Image: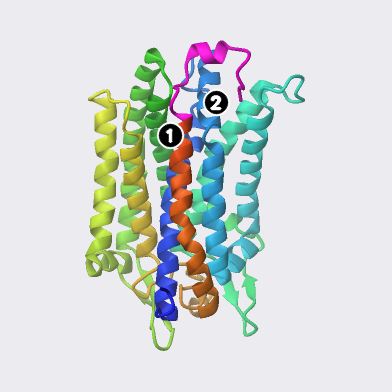
Amino acid sequence: MFETLSLHELQLYWWSIISLLGGLFVFMMFVQGGQTLLFGLTRNELERTMMVNSLGRKWELGFTTLVLFGGALFAAFPKFYASSFGGAYWLWLGILFSFILQAVSYEYRTKKNNFFGQTSYEIFLWINGVFGTLLLGIAISTFISGAPYIIDENNFVVWQSSLRGIEALFVWQNYLLAFSLLFLVRIIAGMYFLNNIDHEAFRDKIRSMIMRNILFFLVPFLGFIAWVLLKDGYEYNPESLIVSIVPMKYFYNFLEIPFLLVMFLLGIVLVLFAVYRAVFKEKNCCIFTVGIGTVLTVMSLLLNIGVNNTVYYPSISDLQSSITIVNSSGSHYTLLTMSYVSLMVPFVLAYIYVVWRAMDKVKITEEEMNDASEHHY
């Protein structure tokens, strides 16, 4: 099945798989979005408990998707993994620490005689939601803004900044995607709560929150899109692999691959349509519409920065050290073997769907939260 594919075709195949997993992970980050709402959206402890338990049923699915995304990226394109994770380790350690806080908080929030107390664990969840999301947005933005590294003659990565990833925090353009991501996952979380929590007064507040956040989302998102489409990009020659600067590279990628442009625009339309139905039509079933829109939008953006001879991790220290899907991938044998493993992806998606449906058969209610015999996060 895969034996007839060339190395470059396998590289394109795996970048497509990673782009899909990236889109799925951003959708599943509604858990982080919901955690940012724990203190601003709730009136009392009961509502906060309903939110935490609603999110607690799904946080492991998001973590599974993150592991799949990171594992696929590491296995298919190990040089990127070595460059970014090995060089910008303070940034990635910050992200990792925030996710450790999340896992610990869901486990210990309602444990009797816990050391920190329930409110402390709720604050930890809020920290993961806000700072984990912002840091991830900044890290992903370096796919476009670049990073200060050099790959020497021994193929070793030499990071050129003593800040080890913290320097990305001082590139203001990186915050455009970071804040777009933050407000997007809050919107998706609102859609999820409408579908999952049976509490009408709470739903009214959620709709107001979605309306505010779509406005907050559009400002940085439109700024991010304008920055990406108008900025200089980096292109490599497929024969010599020499990297050169190309004005408006990402804009022309959309024009030269119309399928990506259609996917991108369709994704945005679906997100806005879901918001319209949730807010103005007062529908509670828009989570999958906004989910599909999110996956399509993120997937099209990731594909844009990796295909059509595009550099997906530019080096701002040495242009020729920049990383592409060609010079960062594993061997033909490695990608070929992994391609058969990738046939398990549909089963993983089916698992997520089945588990999701099973968990959502019964909505979160006040009665359930007041039942001491039920397991509560």
Q: Where 129 falls versus 121 (above or below)?
A: below
Q: Residue at x 45, y 23 (%)?
A: 362
Residue 92 vertical position relative to residue 41 in the rendered view, above or below:
below
Q: Residue at x 51, y 37 (%)?
A: 32
Horizontal and vertical percent for residue 182? Answer: 45, 40
Residue labelled with disc 1: 357
- Check the image and report above or below for 194 versus 287: above
The residue at which mark 2 appears reads as 52
Range drawn in magenta: 359-377
- Decide whether residue 372 is among the magenta residues: yes
Nearest to the observer: residue 67 or residue 244? 67
Residue nearer the viewer, 331 or 308: 331
Q: Which image quadrant: the C terminus?
A: top right
Question: From this viewpoint, which residue is outermost toward the bottom?
Answer: 240
Q: Label 2: few (<14), some or many (≥20) within 10 Å?
A: many
Does dot 2 land on a helix, a strand or a loop? helix
Badge 1 amino acid = Arg
Secondary structure at badge 1 equals helix
Q: Are marks 2 and 1 in contact (CB under 8 Å)?
A: no
Q: Position of residue 229 (x, y in %)?
A: 30, 60
